[in-house]
Amino acid sequence: MQYKSKDIAKVSVEMAMSSREEEQELKDKYSKKGIKTAAVDIGGNVVESIPKILERTLVAAKRNGLISESHVYEGAVTGATREAIDQILDKSVGFNVGGKIGIARCQEHLSVCIFLTIGMFRLDEVVIGLGHRAVPNE
């Protein structure tokens, strides 16, 4: 099947919003469809965590076979992650957060989603950021 960027973005959002129990089921489901996925938990102060978020996303993408060791692919993952971070910063600066990064890739489509809950007093706010990059087929 030919997937579009929208389809792969949906998968990354689903991975980011999944529980740890659901994560492996989703990975298996999408693997059968030819879509590679990864997810990683994150938390802490958002601004202080930016380098860790970038690093964890890149490591997860490599470990799960979404990208190979190449500056082209590493740059694409980092760029998509930065784009997602930019989208969540306004709501989350100065707060402690917890959540997950979901990554999905199929052919030339690469998508990174960051889904976070923001603890504010008794309110739990949520925020989502999504980045996409087109990469060469391997």
Image (cartoon, rainbow, N blue to C red):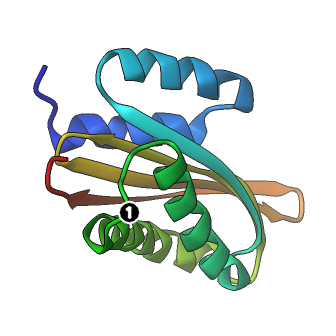
Task: Tell me: residue 138, above or below residue 2.
Answer: below
Q: How many marks?
A: 1
Residue 108, x across and y down, in percent: 17, 48
> Which quadrant is the N terminus positioned in?
top left
Question: Residue at image x 41%, y 71%?
Answer: 78
Residue 85, x across and y down, in percent: 49, 72
Classify mark 1: helix, strand or loop. loop
Question: Residue at image x 69%, y 77%?
Answer: 49
Residue 77, x across and y down, in percent: 38, 64
Residue 125, x across and y down, in percent: 69, 57
Question: Residue at image x 31%, y 74%?
Answer: 71
The part of the image, by quadrant, that contains residue 2 is top left
Mark 1 Cα-neighbour bin, 10 Å: few <14, some 14–19, many ≥20? few
Q: Is residue 2 left or right of residue 63?
A: left
Q: Is residue 66 left or right of residue 125?
A: left
Viewer-proximal residue among 81 and 67:
67
* Residue denoted by label 1: 69
Residue type at the position of mark 1: Glu
Viewer-proximal residue among 106 and 123:
106
In the displayed orientation, state which residue is furthest to the right.
121
Task: Tell me: residue 61, above or below residue 46.
Answer: above
Q: Is residue 50 left or right of residue 66?
A: right
In the displayed orientation, state which residue is furthest to the left.
2
In the displayed orientation, state which residue is furthest to the front.
69
